[in-house]
Image (tube, rainbow, N blue to C red):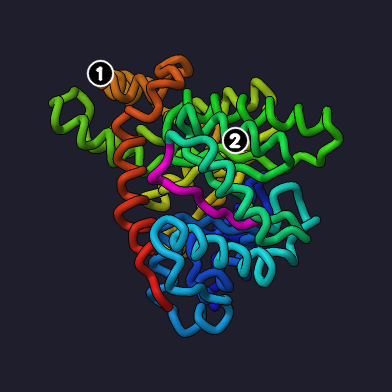
C-alpha cells in the first residue's frame, strides 16, 4: 500500500481527525494505514461500492428478499453496509479518541422535510451496531432535519448534519445538536457525537454556475476560495462559541481545499482521489488560521448567493431547503445514489 506522508501528518501531527470517504475495501484499508480512523458514506458511495465489488459484499452481507422494495430497499442496503463496516473495520478504533471508530449512514434524501421518517431511519441505522454505538446518522440540514437531529441527539444517537454548505446551516445544526445533547445528559443518557458537514467543493460548484449566469464580478480564481472562505468563517464561530460538535469539511474538489484548512480541530472527510493528490505534498504547514484575502471575499460578495452562505444570518432555517445548493445536492443523492440502491440486487 502507498504511504501518504501528508495524510499521516494531518492524522498524527495536527488537531484534525481523518475519516475516509469510500466503501471500496482496498481504498479503506489504504486510508487506515495512512491514519484514517473513521469513515463517511452517502447513497452514491454505497451504490457505487456495491456495483464495483458485488462478490465481496454478497459474501459478507445478509442480503434481503426481493419483496423489500423502493425506499425500504435503499435504506436496508445502507444499513447493512454501515453495520458491517462499523463492526468489522471501525470498531477497533473505538476508545482511541472522541471521533474515532465511526461510520456514517445517510437518511433518505427523498424525504428532507419529513422529521418522523428521518428519525425512524436514524434509529434503524443505530440498531445495526448496538455494541459499539459507532454508526452516525447523516441527516440533511433542513428545518425538519434539524428537528430530527435534536430528537436523535436527545436519545444518544450519533448525528451528522449533511447537505450543508453554508455558515447559517452549520450553526443551526450545532445548536440543534446542543439542545438534544443537553436533554440526553439531563435524562441520564450517554450523549452521542455531533458533527456539522460543510461541503466546500459542492458550494464552489454551485456558486460557479451562479457567477457565470449572473455575470458577477468574481472570477474562476475567486470561486476556488468560496467554500474555503465559508469554512474558515464557520470554524472561527465554532471555536468562539465552544460548541460540543465539530465541523467536517467534505466534497473537496482538489488537494488545495484540504491544504487551506489544514490544522483545524475537526473531522475531515477525504476521498481517495483527494488523498492521492496530496501524496507528494511536502508543505506541512497549518493554514486554517490564515485568512482569505479581503479582495477575494469582496468580489465573491457581489453574488447574493455567496452572502447567504457566508453570513451567519444569511438565511433563516425555513430558507435552507430552498437554497439552490441544497436542492442540487439532494437531487444528486436521490438520482445518483438512493434510487440506484432501491433497484440494487446482489
Q: Nearer the viewer, mark 2 or mark 1?
A: 2
Res. 36 image quadrant? bottom right
Foreground residue among 239 and 280: 239
Residue 292 is covered by the magenta coloring: no
Examine the rendered structure and indicate whether residue 104 appears above or below residue 295: below
- What's the residue at 48%, 34% (across, down)? 141
Badge 2: how crowded within 10 Å, few (<14), some, or many (20+)? many
View extreme (front): residue: 67
Foreground residue among 278 and 44: 44
Q: Which residue is mark 1?
A: 302
Can you tell which mark lies on residue 149?
2
Residue 29 appears at what percent x and percent y? 58, 73
Q: Quadrant where the N terminus lies?
A: bottom right
**Helix, strand, or loop for circle 1?**
loop
How far apart marks 2 and 1 lie (CA) works out to: 34 Å
Residue 278 visible to an observer of this rendering: no
Left or right, 250 with reference to 184: left
Residue 165 appears at what percent x and percent y? 42, 35
Res. 295 image quadrant? top left
Residue contact between numbered discs 2 and 1, judged by CB atoms under 8 Å: no
Residue 124 visible to an observer of this rendering: yes
Q: Which residues are magenta?
A: 102-112
Can you tell which mark lies on residue 18?
none
**Helix, strand, or loop for circle 2?**
helix
Q: Main secondary structure of the magenta part?
A: loop
- What's the residue at 58%, 46% (across, down)? 120
- What's the residue at 43%, 78% (across, down)? 346
- What's the residue at 63%, 49% (across, down)? 123
Residue 318 appears at what percent x and percent y? 42, 21
Badge 1: how crowded within 10 Å, few (<14), some, or many (20+)? some
Amino acid at each position: 500500500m502507498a504511504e501518504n506522508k501528508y495524510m499521516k501528518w494531518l492524522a498524527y501531527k495536527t488537531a484534525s481527525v481523518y475519516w475516509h470517504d469510500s466503501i471500496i475495501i482496498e481504498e479503506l484499508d489504504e486510508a487506515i494505514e495512512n491514519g484514517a480512523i473513521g469513515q463517511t458514506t452517502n447513497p452514491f458511495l454505497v451504490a457505487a461500492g456495491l456495483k464495483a465489488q458485488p462478490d465481496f459484499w454478497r459474501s459478507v452481507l445478509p442480503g434481503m428478499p426481493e419483496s423489500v422494495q423502493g425506499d425500504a430497499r435503499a435504506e436496508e442496503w445502507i444499513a447493512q453496509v454501515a453495520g458491517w463496516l462499523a463492526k468489522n473495520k471501525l470498531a477497533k478504533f473505538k476508545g482511541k479518541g472522541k471521533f474515532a471508530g465511526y461510520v456514517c449512514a445517510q437518511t433518505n434524501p427523498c424525504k428532507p422535510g419529513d422529521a418522523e421518517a428521518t428519525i425512524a431511519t436514524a434509529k434503524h441505522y443505530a440498531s445495526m451496531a448496538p455494541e459499539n454505538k459507532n454508526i452516525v446518522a447523516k441527516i440533511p440540514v433542513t428545518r425538519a432535519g434539524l428537528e430530527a437531529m435534536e430528537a436523535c441527539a436527545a436519545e444518544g444517537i450519533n448525528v451528522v448534519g449533511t447537505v450543508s454548505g453554508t455558515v447559517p446551516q452549520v450553526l443551526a445544526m450545532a445548536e440543534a445538536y446542543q439542545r438534544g445533547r443537553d436533554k440526553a445528559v439531563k435524562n441520564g443518557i450517554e450523549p452521542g457525537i455531533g458533527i456539522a458537514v460543510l461541503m466546500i467543493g459542492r458550494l464552489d460548484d454551485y456558486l460557479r454556475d451562479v457567477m457565470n449566469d449572473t455575470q458577477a464580478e468574481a472570477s474562476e480564481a475567486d470561486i476556488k476560495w468560496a467554500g474555503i472562505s465559508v469554512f474558515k468563517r464557520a470554524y472561527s464561530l465554532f471555536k468562539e462559541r465552544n460548541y460540543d460538535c465539530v465541523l467536517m469539511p467534505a466534497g473537496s474538489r482538489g488537494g488545495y481545499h484540504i491544504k487551506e484548512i489544514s490544522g483545524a480541530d475537526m473531522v475531515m472527510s477525504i476521498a481517495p482521489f483527494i488523498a492521492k493528490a496530496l501524496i507528494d505534498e511536502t508543505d506541512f504547514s497549518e493554514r486554517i488560521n490564515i485568512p482569505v484575502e479581503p479582495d477575494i471575499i469582496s468580489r465573491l460578495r457581489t453574488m447574493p448567493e455567496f452572502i447567504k452562505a457566508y453570513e451567519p444570518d444569511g438565511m433563516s432555517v425555513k430558507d435552507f431547503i430552498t437554497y439552490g445548493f441544497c436542492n442540487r445536492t439532494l437531487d444528486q443523492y436521490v438520482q445518483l445514489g438512493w434510487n440506484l440502491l432501491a433497484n440494487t440486487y446482489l
